[in-house]
């Protein structure tokens, strides 16, 4: 199943800066792992926001939740998930 996922990140300002950098490094590592698995084929930055829009290709809701909750920034994210279906007019 394909899902469009918008992730808005909101790290608390009072979080220790060294801790923030550690979390961001771990986030990058985990995001690369998921992308290399083929389950995260598209990752796009939202201009002007600390946010991204991504497409995940997974077996279903449970796998998507498992992947999203494995991200180190997950506790600081607001996530919006939209299931996708093939459009009848798409030539792809």
Image (tube, helix red, strand yellow):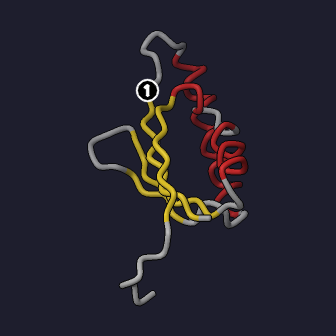
Question: For this rendering, which residue is in front, 29 or 45?
Answer: 45
When the figure is inspected, residue 59 is found, relative to residue 64, above or below; the finding is: below
Q: Residue furthest bottom?
A: 91
Can you say which quadrant of the picture contains the C terminus?
A: bottom left
Q: Position of residue 72 (x, y in %)?
A: 64, 33
Q: Position of residue 8 (x, y in %)?
A: 42, 37
Write the residue at 53% across / 58% down. 3
**How many numbered markers are drawn?**
1
- Within 10 Å of the Cα at label 1, are there few (<14), some (14-19), or many (20+) other Cα atoms? some
**Quadrant of residue 51 in the image?**
top left
Write the residue at 51% across / 63% down. 42
Circle 1 — which element? loop
Q: Mark 1 highlights which residue?
A: 10
Can you say which quadrant of the picture contains the N terminus?
A: bottom right
Q: Residue furthest top?
A: 14
Write the residue at 54% across / 13% down. 16
Q: Position of residue 6 (x, y in %)?
A: 44, 46
**Quadrant of residue 41 in the image?**
bottom right
Q: Position of residue 7 (x, y in %)?
A: 46, 41
When the figure is inspected, residue 91 is found, relative to residue 47, above or below; the finding is: below
Write the residue at 46% across / 32% down. 78
Question: For this rendering, which residue is in front, 28 or 55?
Answer: 55
Q: Residue furthest front?
A: 88
């Amino acid at each position: 199943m394909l899902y469009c996922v918008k992730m808005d990140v909101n790290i608390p300002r009072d979080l220790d800066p060294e801790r923030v950098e550690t979390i961001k490094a771990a986030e990058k590592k985990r995001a690369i792992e998921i992308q290399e698995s083929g389950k995260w084929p598209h990752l796009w930055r939202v201009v002007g926001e600390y946010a991204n829009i991504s497409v995940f290709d997974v077996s279903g809701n449970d796998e998507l939740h498992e992947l999203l909750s494995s991200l180190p920034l997950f506790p600081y994210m607001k996530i919006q998930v939209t299931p996708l279906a093939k459009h009848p007019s798409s030539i792809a």
